[in-house]
Structures are given as C-alpha cells and as structure tokens.
Amino acid sequence: MRRLLAAIAAFSLAFVAPASGSPAGGPTVGGFASDNFEYVTHIPFNNDTAGARIFGRYLYLTTTRDLRIYDITKPAAPELVGSAVIPQFPPYFGEEDPDTNGKILLLNGSVVDVEDKTNPVVIGEHEADQHTISCVLDCTYAYGSEGAIVDLRDPTKPKVVGDWTKFAPPLGNTHDVTEVKPGLVMTSTNPLVYLDARKDPLRPKVLAAAGTDDGSYMHANLWPRQGKERYLLVGSETLGPRCGPDSGAFMTWDTKNWQKTRTFKLTDTYRVENGLYTDGNSPANLFCAHWFETHPKYRNGGLVAMAWYEHGTRLFDISSTGKIKEAGYFIPYGGSTSAAYWANDEILYSVDYNRGLDVLRYTGKV
C-alpha cells in the first residue's frame, strides 16, 4: 500500500511542478496548460493556418485555401462574418503574416479589398513572390521579406518598384519585416536592420543593424509600443527536429543609445527544453520558435505570448532589465502552433497548423 500511495503521489506531482518553471498545470479539454490559462473553445475550420492579424474589432485569418474574417467584438466567441477563396501556395504555408490597414489586406501577390468585411475581394495582383509582405506608410507601400518594394498607392494596380535589400548590409537570411511606426521598419534578417523609409520608401536609409555570429535564422521581431520600449524582441527559427540548447530562440535586444551606437546588444535568450507534456514541455519538436505578440498592457516589460510549434504557446514575462522568465504554456493535443494573438487583456488566440484556432483565457497577473 505504501508503494502504491508513493506512486500516486509521484504521479500527482507531475501535474504540480513543471520542470519548465511555469505555474503548475495539467490536462484540459484542449491540451496541457499551466494553471493561469483556461481553455475556452476551438474553431476547427482553419486547420492549415499559419497566421492572422487583428485590426480593430476584426481577426483576419488566412489558410492555403481562403481568407476568413471574424468579428471579435465578443473575443471569447469569434463570429465568422466573411470569407473569400484565395488559394495560396505552396500547400501548408499560406500567408504567415498577413497585414492590413482595415481597408486593404496583403496576401503574397494579392491585394484584397476588406472594407466590406462580409465580402472581401481581390482587387489587384503583383509579381513580388515573397514569403511575407508587410504594409509600410499605411499600406501605400509594401515591403516583402526578400526585398521587394511594392507601390500600393493605387491598390488596384500594385507595382514592384524596388528592392530594400540593396540598401542594407549583406544579409545571412531574410524572413519578415515589421513596421515599428509609420515609415520605420525593422527587418527579421541576420543582421537585424532598422530602416527609415519616411522620406523615400524606394531608397530606405539604414539607421542601425545588429546580428549574431552563430548564423541564427531570424524569423520575427517586435519593438513594442512603436519603439518606446528599451528592449527589442526577436525570435529565431530552426528547421528540422533539433530544438535544443543551440537552436531557435526567443531573444531580447537592448536598444539603449542606438541612435549613437547604430546597433543593438543581445541581452537575454530563451530556448525550450524537450520533456514531458505533464511538465509543460513536448517530447520532440519539428521546428523552433514562431510568431509572438506582447500583451496589451506591456509597459517597461511585461507578458509576451509566443507560438513554438509542438511546444504550443509559451508565455514569457520580460523584466524591466530585459530578462526572460517563462510564465505559462498551452500545449494543444495533436498541435503544431504557428502564432499567438491577444484579443484583449484576457483572451488569447492560439493559431495552429493542425488544429485551426484555439481560444484561451489568461487568468494570471499582468
């Protein structure tokens, strides 16, 4: 009997003290989660989605087949209001990082009119074949991940007019660009490059650059609150089943005095550990680190939700000194998580290649 009780106690502890350092957790209806996450619901219709975008009270979600628009006035219960069949290639990799100003939306080589949320329509096409493409200067221009500059001043006649990589230092990889604030763009490249496109979008000026010596494949970046935060957030991706101590990571970069030094300094790095679902980890991972987003109340540090493929959605707490601490997790059953988006202070959308859209509620401290 003593051995049986000891075994039961040991089994129970597996759900109480996750090795990852996150709050205690265990199985839920939708997956394994730390105690500061509640599973709300699952929307399965977008089961090959790689990404989405929240703009205003709408969620724009892409798959390899179509674009779907959800009204998220009630964040815990997204309501589908419109869709359009827009095939994207290659299969399984639809537009990962769709961008919009609420009037038009960019999907690879297509420009979609989304003013009528119930009836999105493709109104223009261009020849820039880019992995991701992002709005610049309120979608009057677009910057593609591989360098294409697209003139969108007439969105019905988009035109490739330049290549921003010609004005950057030699790049080890290109994956995405993010507009920090109007006309100021950070590239997810190695090195990271901060570009000023305000005066001349066709000839952006390099303001700062910083990279790593290990050849990290920079995947995404975010300089919170339009560059008002001290620490730049960056994620690197690793292809293949080799997530470990030297693979894809979540990073903070110190931007202090960047105007003078024209560079940034790597501050802290986080990588997942393979383990057991009961301790908040996954036994294996096919890729490492994907899209992430800061909590709406992020100020001088705070919470960041990040997608990490088979390791699900990871929650981090960034300190005022740029240190990264794991603060929670949600690992869905049979999932491969691509992106995470905060709908409000509590509701988090977990976008998954295999599952579609999982709706979570964060119940912890902000």
Image: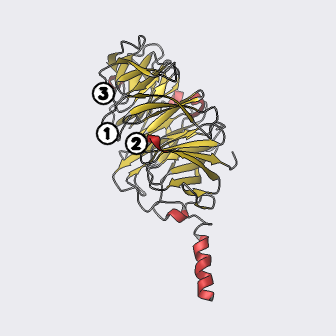
Q: Which mark is residue 91?
A: 1
Q: Which label's residue is closer to the chain start, 1 or 3?
A: 1
Quadrant holding the N terminus: bottom right
Which percent across, then down, holds residue 289?
A: 45, 47
Residue at horizontal 40%, vertical 32%? 66
Front residue of 106/193: it is: 106
The residue singled out by tag 2 in the image is 48
Residue at horizontal 64%, vertical 35%? 74
Q: Which label's residue is closer to the chain start, 1 or 2?
A: 2
Which percent across, then down, holds residue 222?
A: 52, 35
Confirm or deny contact between disc 1 and disc 2 (CB under 8 A): yes
Give the side of residue 226 with respect to residue 185, left or right. right
Q: Please state which of the two labelled residues, at mark 1 or mark 3, is closer to the viewer.
A: 1
Amino acid type at mark 2: Asp
Give the side of residue 43 with respect to residue 149, left or right. right
The residue singled out by tag 3 in the image is 129
- The local secondary structure at tag 3 comes to loop
Which percent across, then down, holds residue 218?
A: 40, 40
Please rate how many residues cluster around mark 3, counting C-alpha atoms within 10 Å: few if below 14, some from 14 to 19, many from 20: few
Residue at horizontal 40%, vertical 55%? 246
Amino acid type at mark 1: Pro
- The local secondary structure at tag 1 comes to loop
Front residue of 17/259: it is: 17
Confirm or deny contact between disc 3 and disc 2 (CB under 8 A): no
Give the answer, above or below, for where 62 lies relative to 157: below
The quarter holding residue 205 reads top left
Q: Which label's residue is closer to the chain start, 3 or 2?
A: 2
Please rate how many residues cluster around mark 2, counting C-alpha atoms within 10 Å: few if below 14, some from 14 to 19, many from 20: many
Q: Is residue 342 visible?
A: yes
Tell me the distance, in whole angstroms, between the alpha carbons under discs 1 and 3: 15 Å
